[in-house]
Amino acid sequence: MRWKAGAAFAAAGILPTALAGAAAARLPQAVLTIAFAATAALAATRMLRPAPATAMADGRAVRPGKAAGTGAGLGALTGLLGVGGGFLAVPALVTVLAFEMQAAVGTSLLVVSAHSLASPATRSGAAVSLDWAVIGPFTATAILGAWDGKRLTAKVSGPRLQRLFALVLLAVAAFMLADAVR
């Protein structure tokens, strides 16, 4: 985990997350779903491209301004799309800030935690209620998956993990788009 860059990335995204979350309540769900699918497909496509030769392999040379700018943009998308941002945080950390995949995954947890708290706070006044019967089991499964995922990442190389992540993200984008246009 890259604490310094991750903290700048997360902090810069909190206000944009909240503002975009408030704006999202006024948009049709189909538009948000299509935007989600398009954004996920773009992020996955960028992750499938080879990294530029000048990228810093360890992500330590990240300029705070670049981390904050990227975090603000991600925060706006997080709030608008109503997601924690992990599916975008990892590609942003890898492709924009040149983190290796394992550091991007770890750092994204800090970013997702901060952004996940800001967006629902602005949506709480919306007509949409939270379905805890879905959220509870999903959260429990995600925690177990993260625990097992940590063990498995030690066995999978960074580039292979990056390709697998990108392919899963493309599949999610395709399913979301199909659902939105139905």
Image (cartoon, rainbow, N blue to C red):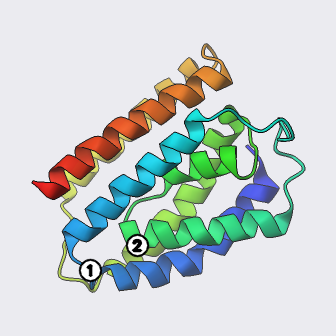
Q: Which amino acid is tagged 1?
A: Leu
62 vs 173: above or below:
below
Where is residue 70? Give x, y as percent.
67, 64
Judged left or right of residue 158, residue 31 is: left
> In which quadrant is the C terminus drawn?
bottom left
| Residue furthest top in the image | 155
Q: Residue at x 87, y 40 (%)?
A: 54
Where is residue 132? Give x, y as percent.
21, 58
Judged left or right of residue 114, residue 65 is: right
87 vs 181: above or below:
above
Proximity of marks 1 and 2: CB atoms separated by less than 8 Å: yes
- Dot 2 corresponds to which residue? 80
> In which quadrant is the N terminus drawn?
top right
Q: Which amino acid is tagged 2?
A: Leu
Q: Residue at x 32, y 41 (%)?
A: 172
Callout 1: 10 Å neighbours few (<14), some, many (20+)?
Answer: few
Q: Residue at x 51, y 48 (%)?
A: 43
Where is residue 145? Give x, y as percent.
42, 31
State which tag comes first along the sequence, 1 or 2. Answer: 1
Quarter of the rendering containing residue 98: top right
Callout 2: 10 Å neighbours few (<14), some, many (20+)?
Answer: many
Cα gap from disc 1 to disc 2, whole angstroms = 9 Å
Where is residue 60? Give x, y as percent.
87, 46
- Dot 1 corresponds to which residue? 27
Asked which secondary structure carries label 2, the reply is: helix
